[in-house]
């Protein structure tokens, strides 16, 4: 079977890309012919995308992904849409479409309410399209929210995502990063600046977990330039010996997302 995944190409910088890459690799390991087409990064607040790449390479994790031209869609038996793409990429082939629903219902609703991106409405409209056979997502808890939006029978919800224990388990391979304070167990807190998540509750849960699990270390990324009261919570983690690396928000993030320069 020929399967084409369409998503923004952004190694190490975009959650949608990382999820799409893992799903593509899973299809490959099942023996399918697979291709990845770069849809370009969406520019927040605009109806435009960054330059789409053909021939871009990602060789992390011991295997090689190279972005294919949009014409690859013409040969697809199944198209995985992880984000929107030009209609012209799909009209020459009437292959069925599976749409990956990335993120939480809350996040999709909030960013559209704030006028930043129409994710919530896009999912609702896409689910009505006859060619879209399933709206696919993890986390069974989300089903009551998405079932309000999607037609009956369109939701395909998997159980909780599996963990690659060889990469993420405490006894797996270790990639040493300068300045990285690694514990026996490591957790990540990110997007502390977002308005569609409650960083106060998330960090309190991290503190409670650190009090119960010896060797648990939390790493905080995308910290605001002025952490303010959040510094008090970080100090609590530090007093528990559970504070690892702290990283601020990355300037010129659009360039990093596209891979135009190395992240510092």
Image (cartoon, rainbow, N blue to C red):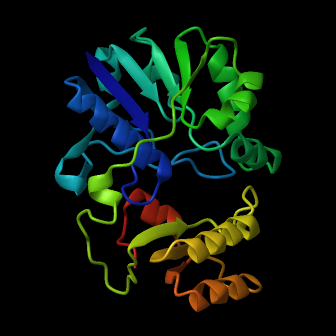
The C terminus: image quadrant: bottom left
Above or below, comparing residue 262 to residue 98 in the picture: below
Q: Is residue 162 left or right of residue 2?
A: right
Residue 218 at x, y = what percent? 52, 74
In which quadrant of the rendered image does the N terminus lie?
top left
Q: Position of residue 93 (x, y in %)?
A: 39, 11
Q: Indicate the position of residue 114 as horizontal and vertical percent values.
A: 81, 51
Residue 263 at least partly seen:
yes
Asked whether 80 or 138 is in front, the reply is 138
Which residue shows up at 18% across the image and 48% down it? Answer: 63
Figure disc tally: 0
Residue 250 visible in the snapshot:
no
- The residue nearer to you, when weighing 153 against 193, is 153
179 on left or right of 101? left
Residue visible at 26% across and 55% down in the picture = 166
**The residue positioned farthest toward the right in the image shown:** 113
Q: Which quarter of the picture shows residue 256?
A: bottom left
In the figure, 192 relative to 42: above or below?
below
Quarter holding residue 197: bottom right
Instruction: Name the residue rendered at 51%, 22% in the picture.
Output: 87
Q: Is residue 66 left or right of residue 207?
A: left
Residue plotted at (42% across, 70% down): 185
In the foreground, 213 or 36:
213
């Amino acid at each position: 079977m020929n399967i084409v995944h369409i998503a923004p190409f952004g190694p190490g910088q975009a959650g949608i890309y990382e999820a799409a890459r893992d799903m593509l690799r899973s299809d490959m390991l099942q023996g399918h012919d697979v291709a990845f087409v770069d849809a370009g990064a969406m520019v927040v607040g605009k109806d435009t995308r960054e330059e789409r790449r053909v021939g871009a390479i990602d060789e992390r994790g011991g295997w090689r992904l190279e972005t294919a031209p949009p014409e690859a869609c013409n040969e697809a038996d199944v198209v995985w849409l992880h984000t929107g793409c030009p209609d012209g990429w799909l009209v020459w082939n009437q292959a069925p479409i599976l749409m990956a629903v990335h993120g939480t219902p809350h996040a999709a609703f909030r960013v559209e309410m704030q006028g930043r991106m129409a994710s919530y409405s896009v999912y609702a409209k896409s689910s009505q399209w006859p060619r879209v056979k399933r709206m696919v997502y993890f986390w069974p808890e989300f089903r009551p929210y998405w079932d309000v939006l999607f037609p009956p029978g369109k939701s395909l919800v998997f159980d909780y995502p599996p963990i690659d224990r060889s990469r993420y388990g405490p006894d797996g391979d270790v990639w040493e990063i300068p300045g990285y304070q690694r514990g026996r167990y490591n957790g990540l807190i990110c997007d502390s600046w977002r308005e569609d998540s409650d960083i106060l509750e998330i960090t309190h849960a991290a503190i409670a977990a650190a009090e119960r699990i010896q060797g648990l270390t939390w790493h905080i990324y995308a910290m605001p330039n002025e952490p303010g009261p959040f510094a008090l919570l970080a100090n609590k983690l530090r007093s528990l010996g559970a504070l690892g690396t702290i990283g601020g928000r990355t300037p010129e993030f659009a360039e990093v997302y596209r891979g135009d320069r190395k992240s510092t």
